[in-house]
């Protein structure tokens, strides 16, 4: 057979494979939860109009650039809309498939990865993290100077009373902050810029090994201290699975759940789909956030080397809703099981007593949880769980109402804008047929 014929067939085969891959990618991207009318699942379409009106008003008032909101009930989407602009200056409209920096909404996904390894018999919740990352064998804790001490008094350190466990990390009770309080100067000197790793040329493991040498802010298990715990868990996933975190999440969670637009770093050809970040101002309309640093972030043009399981992912409302629906379904979506239902029950139970939010809410293995509606002091349901991200994203899952809610925007700083709270209120006011009544303080 001539070389010409071989080359022609090779090119034809290459084209066929490329075309097939493109079709498969398009099919995966088009994958969404089924839709239905709000009324068919006990929600008022008319009252949902209040939600849309409020989103539009905040855009018109220049209090936010744009937002995507999604609500699903009984496994079906009943509201999915985009408001405002992905890029205000360019007048590029916000689209339903816009990609957002989800920051700490990454924590839920990394926590699921850890629980998958537990289900495989490779991790126990009470395992010391030093079993997998020996650098955590002998950690130390900072002791702030006495209030009457001189301003420049040194920070004393003492040995940790016990080993930090996987459960401590999942519940944010390991005592590890983002470099706050008395340890702030040391963390900054060591190159830790709070939760942001996207511009780091070092892999996450190298950063975590360095973190282990710094003093922490509380003794393990004694306080809720929000910080790098889930980034450590991401490194544990790498050590236990033998895979880089991005590869583990892609092959074990994103691809099975058909989350085609969830990444640590955006493919350059998708850059136009990434929302611009805006900054709220105390007394006026939003401003475009600076290009440097974490504001826009090095999620497209950068070293693309450091996979932050605590705050590094990008996603869409639709992708994240599929992840949440899996949890609501007890660990399964369509014909794919990611976790067992008893594992999801464990994750969404309170593990910290009254350590979180002054006891108003509990904290599970990766999310806050509601045990008492009155103490939570907001619309919702006993048993719901959720979290948010620094770039002004938010989610929650309400098992009693069979509800998934996703709010995606990009606002840093947010100046405590109340739009997420209004989104929550406007979701619940539209429910006409509520789920079963649960007594206050009932356990699940």
Image (cartoon, rainbow, N blue to C red):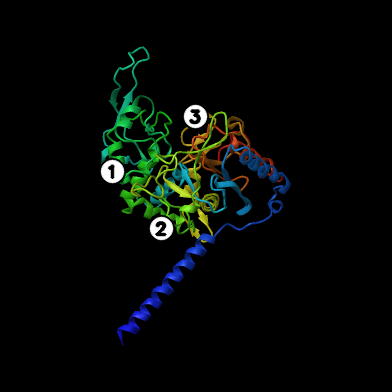
Lower sequence index among marks 3 and 1: 1
**Can you tell which of label 3 and label 1 is closer to the viewer?**
1
Question: Where residue 430 sits in the image (x, y, percent)?
Answer: 69, 43
Q: Nearer the viewer, residue 312 or 272?
A: 272
Tell me, for residue 251, which label it has, or none: 2
Q: Quadrant of the C terminus?
A: top right
Where disc 2 sits, the SS reads helix
> 343 and 265: which one is in front?
265
Q: What element carries label 1?
A: helix
Relative to 278, is 320 above or below? below
> What SS does tag 3 mark?
loop
> Residue at position x 44%, y 57% from top?
269
3 or 2: mark nearer the eye: 2
Q: Distance between the residues labelled 3 and 1?
A: 34 Å
| Mark before the other along the chain sequence, 3 or 2 | 2
Q: Badge 3 is on which residue?
A: 354
Residue of label 1: 206
The vertical placement of 287 against 80, above or below, is: above
Q: Distance between the residues labelled 3 and 2?
A: 37 Å
């Amino acid at each position: 057979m001539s070389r010409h014929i071989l080359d022609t067939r090779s090119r034809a085969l290459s084209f066929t494979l490329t075309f097939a891959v493109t079709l498969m990618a398009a099919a995966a991207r088009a994958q969404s939860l089924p839709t239905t009318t709000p009324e068919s699942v006990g929600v008022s379409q008319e009252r949902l109009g209040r939600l849309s009106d409020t989103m539009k008003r905040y855009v018109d008032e220049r209090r936010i650039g744009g937002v995507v909101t999604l609500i699903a009930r009984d496994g079906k989407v009943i509201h999915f809309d985009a408001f405002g602009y992905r890029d205000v200056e360019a007048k590029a409209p916000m689209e339903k498939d816009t990609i957002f920096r989800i920051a700490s909404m990454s924590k839920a996904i990394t926590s699921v990865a850890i629980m998958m390894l537990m289900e495989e018999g490779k991790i126990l919740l009470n395992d010391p993290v030093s079993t997998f990352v020996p650098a955590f064998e002998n950690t130390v804790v900072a002791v702030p100077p006495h209030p009457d001490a001189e301003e420049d008094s040194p920070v004393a350190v003492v040995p940790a009373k016990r080993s930090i466990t996987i459960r401590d990390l999942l519940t944010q009770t390991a005592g590890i902050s983002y470099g706050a309080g008395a340890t702030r100067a040391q963390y900054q000197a060591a190159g830790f810029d709070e939760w942001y790793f996207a511009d780091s040329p070092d892999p996450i493991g190298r950063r975590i090994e360095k973190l282990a040498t710094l003093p922490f802010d509380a003794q393990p298990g004694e306080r809720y201290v929000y910080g790098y715990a889930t980034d450590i868990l991401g490194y544990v996933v790498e050590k236990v699975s033998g895979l880089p975190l991005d590869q583990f999440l892609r092959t074990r969670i994103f691809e099975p759940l058909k989350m085609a637009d969830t990444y640590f770093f955006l493919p350059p050809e998708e850059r136009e789909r990434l929302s611009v970040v805006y900054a709220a101002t105390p007394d006026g309309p939003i401003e475009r956030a600076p290009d440097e640093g974490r504001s826009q972030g090095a999620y497209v043009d950068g070293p693309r080397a450091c996979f932050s399981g605590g705050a590094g992912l990008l996603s869409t409302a639709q992708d994240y809703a599929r992840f949440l629906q899996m949890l609501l379904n007890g660990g399964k979506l369509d014909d794919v099981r990611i976790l067992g239902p008893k594992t999801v029950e464990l994750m969404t139970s309170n593990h910290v007593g009254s350590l979180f939010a002054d006891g108003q809410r509990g904290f599970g293995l990766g999310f806050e949880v509601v045990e008492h509606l009155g103490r939570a002091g907001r619309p919702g349901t006993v048993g719901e769980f959720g979290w948010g991200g620094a770039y002004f994203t938010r989610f929650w899952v309400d098992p009693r109402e069979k509800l998934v809610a996703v709010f995606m925007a990009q606002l840093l700083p947010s100046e405590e804008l109340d739009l997420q709270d209004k989104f929550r209120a406007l979701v619940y006011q539209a429910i006409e047929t509520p789920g079963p009544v649960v007594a206050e303080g009932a356990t699940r």
